[in-house]
Image (cartoon, rainbow, N blue to C red):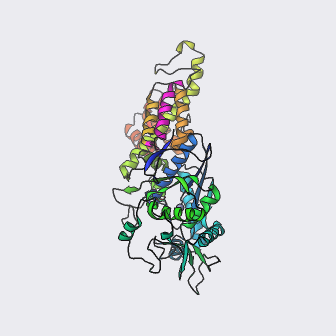
Amino acid sequence: MLKVYNTLHKKIEDFLPIKKGRIGLYACGPTVYNFAHIGNFRAYIFEDILRRVLAYNGYKVKHIVNITDVGHLRSDADAGEDKILEQAKKEGKSAWDIAKFYEAAFKKDWVRLNLLPPSKWARATDHIKDQIKLIKVLEEKGYTYKIPDGIYFDTAKFSGYGKLSGQKLEDKEAGARVAENSEKRHPWDFALWKFSPKDIRREMEWPSPWGKGFPGWHIECSAMSTKYLGQPFDVHAGGIDHIPVHHENEIAQSEAAYGKPLADYWVHGEFLAVDDKKMSKSLGNLYLIDDIVKRGINPLAFRYLCLGAHYRSKLNFTREGLEGANNALKSLYKIARGLGKQKIGLARSLASRPTFGRSHTGEAADGATAEGCAELEQNFLDRINDDLDTPGALAIMWEMLKSDNPTSAKAESLLKFDEVLGLDIKSYLGKKIKIPVAVAKLVKAREAARAEKNWKLSDELRDKIFELGFLAEDTAEGTKVEEK
Ligand code: AMP
Ligand code: ZN
């Protein structure tokens, strides 16, 4: 049975769906004002694993991810400029163009990391009416108040405020910064609707019963999750930084409006640090997926790196760590290539030579079943179902690959495991390496140099082949070329 850590109850719990066989999963998506960094993507990788684990357990998952393309202010206290408008000014573009550009960049990285496409990408600006409707319900129920810059949620009226983070309001009060917006009743009250400044036409603004303006950041998630998944739905996920403000506010809005829980399970992923420091532009240690690609490293090596740490523990990103993950991934692909080849080639040749019933490595021929891997497959399932223990699951995968089970059974298990790991094994299983023409030419030239015993030239050519990402190995049958 699947167990997950539920932030709401601060313990690991058995996972029980609301509707048999179906899961509603909502994950907070990006604010599209800049490129998402590798820390953001650690959160999305964890959410992708969560989704894949749910599917592996036989659930049909409806996965909603929002795109915040308006209304996320610079500070959690609802003061400061909208992040998208601020960036638009910096780049001299329209706010709509900024949102469009960074949304496309985000989705490109999403694909590069082999994250499954959500059932729906839900843009905040496509759901303004739904957000206004929800604010109206809150207004009718007496949870809102108006001050000069907008309509706010009165957190003192919602008795469950603070239940997710476990913070008591008194403690919050003691620790609160000087309220940036002095007219709020409490510093942690938050904007549901912000008014456009008087006499200035904002680029992104909509009419509302309260006046022209734009939605606060939190309201979109409440409106869209309930619209697509109902209320309550099963799982709400995000990074831990969302617990004390964003998710607390989502709960307050949805539960105050409809008098029932927002979601049953709240699952949060820990942060990624770089060289033991918080990642930030000012420290110059903010990395993008593009930076990894530019170093000639497969972005899935970053995914592998994330799998190697439990989602609830901090992950310290280092260059060496990424290179280690890249090497492990390459070994995995190399094994996968071999597995597929033997599955087809070996089984046929053995069938015509029955005396070879078992090869020297103990691999069975035709009729091999997955029985040999059944126990390891169970162990794999146990690991992922134990609060998504991906480091444990990776260890089982390697144990399975090193076992002397039939090759075809190993190939089958590896493909199954990859439904959860998402390392794109199917593109490698049994596939020959495609050698670029430039590399093939160098290999030929090197063979000619070796025939002439010109070892110096042969070594130089080997280096050139290496620079192009391939290894030339000399065997009795000639040069064997492999990817680095
Ligand atoms: P944001 O666009 O700031 O709302 O962040 C998008 C997602 O990335 C959220 O789920 C955050 O919790 C998560 N996130 C932001 N920074 C990090 C980090 N350094 N490590 C892991 N997750 C992060
Ligand atoms: Zn959200």
* Residue 278 in which image quadrant: bottom left
Query: At 59% from the left edge and 20% from the top edge, which residue is drawn?
Result: 367
Give yes or no for residue 429 being in the magenta stretch.
Answer: no
* Coordinates of residue 476 in the picture (x, y in percent): 45, 26
Give yes or no for residue 386 being in the magenta stretch.
Answer: yes
* Coordinates of residue 256 in the picture (x, y in percent): 56, 65
* Coordinates of residue 114 in the picture (x, y in percent): 55, 48
Is residue 62 in sight in this rendering?
yes
Q: Is residue 322 left or right of residue 415?
A: left
- Establish if 347 lies above or below 165: above
Q: Quadrant of the C terminus?
A: top left
- In the rendered structure, which segment of residues is drawn in magenta? 362-390
Residue farthest toward the bottom in the current orientation of the protein: 199
Q: Is residue 295 left or right of residue 341?
A: left
Residue farthest toward the left in the current orientation of the protein: 276
Q: Nearer the viewer, residue 443 or 343?
A: 343
* Coordinates of residue 59 in the picture (x, y in percent): 60, 43
Q: Nearer the viewer, residue 168 or 248?
A: 168
- Establish if 37 lies above or below 375: below
- Establish if 173 lies above or below 423: below
| Count of number-bearing discs | 0
Is residue 461 in sight in this rendering?
no
Residue farthest toward the top in the current orientation of the protein: 355
Q: Is residue 214 left or right of residue 269?
A: right
Q: Nearer the viewer, residue 227 or 369?
A: 227
